[in-house]
Amino acid sequence: MSHDTIAINRRMDRFDRHDSVWLFGYGSLIFKADFPFIERRPASIGNWSRRFWQGSHDHRGTESAPGRVVTLVPELGATCHGMAYLVTPEEFAHLDHREKNGYLRLATDIGFEDGSAIEGIVYIATHENAAFLGAADERDIARQIAGARGPSGPNSDYLLALAQALRELDKPDAHVFAIERHLGELLAQQLT
Ligand code: SIN
């Protein structure tokens, strides 16, 4: 699979005739909503875990020095917390462009805090995409993030904004917080 998923995602027409669709965000889509939405609500999806396993060549890194951003990996019984946005189907043209480096639209059940659930869309970069980097020691992930920067800014800003957004949602994520802690230690070492 090539890096660029725009053409594949355009063929995902399942919700095209709906007036609105729920989109579940678990990474930058939590803290950077650069698209119009009708409503937004804290939400979760089941059997997925958030991991900094996806390479970023277009936003938080470059072709020669990719950064790391989050994707979801299947994990039975896990719950991934994030933010859901009710959008019109036209917004997916912009979202497909934004998420083009390996992310595919997937239909999923999205659960809300009042116990209700609805089918919507999540962008997931699977291990089959060319930009996938996979598992690594969380300290090594922090080191890679500390050294990467791309057109959307330093990779560390992405990590710190995500950690902050999860704190604001009161949804701690051990993986994200561990990498944030390692980043803090690395930056402190650089100052001494
Ligand atoms: C998401 O936020 O839902 C997808 C990953 C990202 O854009 O950071």
Image: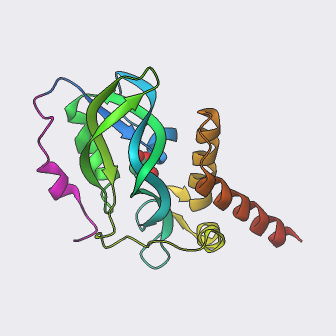
Q: Nearer the viewer, residue 98 or 74?
A: 74
Residue 10 coordinates in the image, percent (x, y): 15, 49
Q: Residue furthest right?
A: 192
Name the side, left or right, on which 104 lies relative to 176.
Answer: left
Q: Residue furthest bottom?
A: 64
Q: Quadrant of the C terminus?
A: bottom right
Tell me what residue is drawn at x 23 percent, y 25 percent: 20
Residue 14 coordinates in the image, percent (x, y): 12, 39
Find residue 18 and report its image quarter.
top left
Q: How is the image coloured?
A: rainbow
Tell me what residue is drawn at x 55 percent, y 57 percent: 153
Q: Quadrant of the N terminus?
A: bottom left
Residue 178 coordinates in the image, percent (x, y): 67, 59
As for residue 37 lying within the magenta part, the answer is no
Tell me what residue is drawn at x 44 percent, y 59 percent: 59
Q: Is residue 4 above or below residue 85?
A: below
Residue 100 seen in the figure: yes
Q: Is residue 141 above or below residue 179?
A: below
Q: Nearer the viewer, residue 9 or 90?
A: 9
Residue 60 seen in the figure: no
Q: Which residues are magenta?
A: 1-17
Name the side, left or right, on which 9 lies relative to 181.
Answer: left
Q: Nearer the viewer, residue 166 or 5?
A: 166
Residue 129 coordinates in the image, percent (x, y): 29, 69
